[in-house]
Amino acid sequence: MDATGQMVLANRLADGRVVFLAADGSWVEDLAGGAMAADADAGERLLVAARLAESSNTVVEPYLIAVRQVAGGRQPVAWREAIRAAGPTVRTDLPGGSHVPLR
Amino acid sequence: MYRYDEFDHTLVAERIATFRRQVQRRLSGDLTEDQFKPLRLMNGLYLQLHAYMLRVNIPYGCLSARQLRKLAGIARRYDRGFGHFTTRQNIQYNWIRLDETPDVLAALADVEMNAMQSSGNCVRNITADQFAGRARDEVEDPRPWCELIRQWSILHPEFSYLPRKFKIAVSGATVDRAAVKFHDVGLYLRRDADGVVGFEVIVGGGQGRLPYVGHTIREWLAKEDLLSYLEAILRIYNLGGRRDNPQKARIKVQVNALGPDEFRRLVDEEWEQIRQSPLLAVPRAEIERIAAYFADPLWATLPDEPAAIAHQRRVEPGFDDWYRANVVDHRTPGYAIVNLSLKSPGIAPGDLTADQMDKVADLAERFSLGELRVSHRQNLVFPDVRQRDLHGLWRELGQLSLATPNIGQLTDIIACPGLDFCALANARAIPVAQDIGRHFSDSAVLQDIGELTINISGCMNACGHHHVGHIGILGVEKNGQEFYQLTLGGSSGEDASLGDRLGRSISAAEVPPAIEAIVERYRSLRLAGERFLDTYRRVGIEPFKEAVYGTRPERPRAVA
C-alpha cells in the first residue's frame, strides 16, 4: 500500500498562487518541496506553523491535505487538491496550464 | 455606446484610489483576510483555486474595439494571455496578482471599464439581449434602460449590503435571448393595448440550488416609473430577504415563500409611498440624454444582397454552413448581425487569447463599426456587418478559429470554469464540453440535429445554467470522484422551463455516449419541423431514460 501523509496547502497572499509549507517554514510552489507529516500530531504542528504565517500575512486559508507517496512522486489524495497542486487540466497550450492525467 | 461623464470618471478613479489603499493595508497586515475579503469582492476580486480571479463588467454585453484591445493588453501584461467570457456577459481573468490589481483597475478605467459590483451582495452587471438595437424582433432598444439601471444601482447607499447578490436582465425583443425569466428581476419591453411601450416586470427567477422560473408581478409598467418600482422591489427584498441563511437569501426564496400575489401587494404598498419621489422619477430629458449614446450609427444606405450571398453560399458550402448558423437578420437593409463562435472544438467555451482579442478588435473596426457584443451563451457578436462583407469576414474569422458554424447547435456549449479554476466547484466542466465537442465533430450531423443547447455547471450554483439547457449537465462529487447528472427539457427562452432529472449520475467518459443516445432517440422520434425541445415536451422523459439507461436505470446502457 502507498504511504500517505499530510501537507499544508495555502494561497500566497500577494499573488494568490498555491504554495506548500516546507520544513524550514518557507512556502514553496512545488509539491515535492513541501513538508510531509507522517501522523496526525505532526500534521497538527504543521498547521499551527501555517496559521502563524497566515496571521503574519504571508498566506491565505491554509489547510491540511492528504498526500500519497506514489512511484514518481507525491499525489494529493483528493481530486480537487490534485488539481490545485498541478494547475488546471485545460489550457495546457498556454503558460500556467499543467496537465493532470484523468483518473 | 455609453461614454463616461465626469461623475463616472470621478467615481471610478476614487474607487480605485480607495482600493489601492485597501490592498496596501492588506499586504502590510493592517487588514486581516476577514476584513479585506468583502472589500476585494466589491471590486470583483475573488481568490480561486490557483490564484486571484478578477471579474470585469461588460455593461449589458457592449464592448468597443478599443476596450477589447485594452482587455487583450491586460491579459498579456497581468494575466497569462487569455480571458474567459461568462454567462453574465462579463470577462474573467484567472491569474491576477493581488498587488497588481489596482493597476489593472486603472488600466480598465482608461477605457471606461470597471469591476465594481461584479461580486458581492449587491446589484450585479445588468445583462441584455446581445442583439439589442439591431434585432428585427425588437420593440425597443433595452440599452438606455440598462444604463439607467446601472447608474441607479452603482453604490446605491440602501442596496450595497443586500441579503444576497441581485441580477437584473432586460430584453426588448420578442425572442428571449437573455434568460430574462431566470433573473432576480427580469424586464421585457412590451407594448400595452394602446401601443405604448413599458415594462413587463418579472421577479424571483433564478437557478442555483433552488431554481425557479420568475413570476410576472406587473404586466405593464410605465417607463417613468421604472426606478421607483425597482426601488420598491429592492426594499421589500432588503427588508424581508433571508439574511439568516445564505442558501435561502435570494429574492426567489422570498417571492416563492410569500407567493407572487403577496409579494406584489407588498411591492405596490411600498411603491405607493415612493412613486412620486422626485429622486426616483425618471426625467424625460435624462432618458433622452442617455438614449443619445445608443443612437443608430451612420449606417450606409445599402440594398439587401440576397443574390450575391446566395451565389457565394452555393459555391462555398463552408460559407453556407456558417451563414445559416451564425448570421442573423439585421433590422437595416444591407446589414447583418454576425455571431463569432467561441466554441471551436477543443477550446474552453468562452475563452479568447490576447492575440485573438487584438485581431477581433481589428476586425470589429474593419467590419462592424468598431463595436461588438458579448452574449450570455459565451460568444461574441458583430452587430453591424455589411452583407457584402460577410464572405470576407467569414474568411478572416476562420483564420482565428472563430467561424465554427455552430451557434445554437449542440456544440455551442455553455460551461462554467468548473473545478479547473473555481473554488466552489465539485467537478470540472470545460473538459466535458471539450469531449462533447470532439465527439460531435460532423457539421452535417450537427445541422441535422438542429437547435439544441447543452449547458454545463461544475456545481449546484449553476453558473453554467445547467437547469435551462435543453440538455443540462451538472457536475457532482462522489467519494472524491467527478460524476455528472443530466437534465432534459430546460429552456431559458420566453418558453422558460427547468430541466427534468434524467436518472443517476454518470462518469465523465460516459457523458458523450449518453448525449449521443439522447440525440439518436430524438432523431428517431421527431416529427417534421420539431426541435429537440419540442419532441421532448411532446413525448416526455421516458424514451430518453430508456435510451441512456435501458431497462436498468442504475447503469447507463449507452456506455456499457
Image: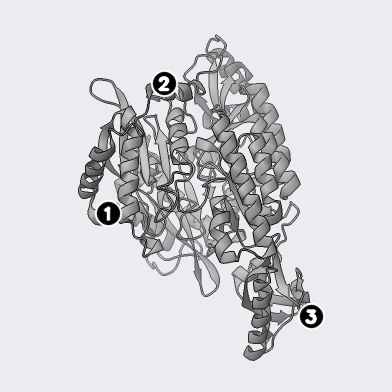
Q: Secondary structure at mark 1?
A: helix
Q: Would you name the residue on which mark 3 appears?
A: A24
- The dot on residue B256 is 1
The residue located at (64%, 49%) in the rendering is B346
**Visual colour scheme:** one colour
Q: Nearer the viewer, residue B482 or B190?
A: B190
Quadrant placement of the N terminus of chain B: top right
Q: Is residue B29 above or below residue A25?
A: above
Q: Nearer the viewer, mark 3 or mark 1?
A: 3
Q: Quick check: B128 left or right of B418?
A: left
Asked where in the image residue A89 lies, by quadrant, the reply is bottom right
Q: Is residue B266 above or below residue B402?
A: below
Asked where in the image residue B528 lies, by quadrant, the reply is top left
Q: Is residue B471 above or below residue A44?
A: above
Badge 3 amino acid: Asp
Around disc 2, counting alpha carbons within 10 Å, would you say few (fewer than 14), some (14 to 19), or many (20 or more)?
A: few
Residue A6 in percent (x, y) is at: 66, 82
CA separation, marks 3 and 1?
A: 56 Å
Asked where in the image residue B363 lies, by quadrant, the reply is top right
- The dot on residue B285 is 2
Residue B293 in percent (x, y) is at: 52, 23
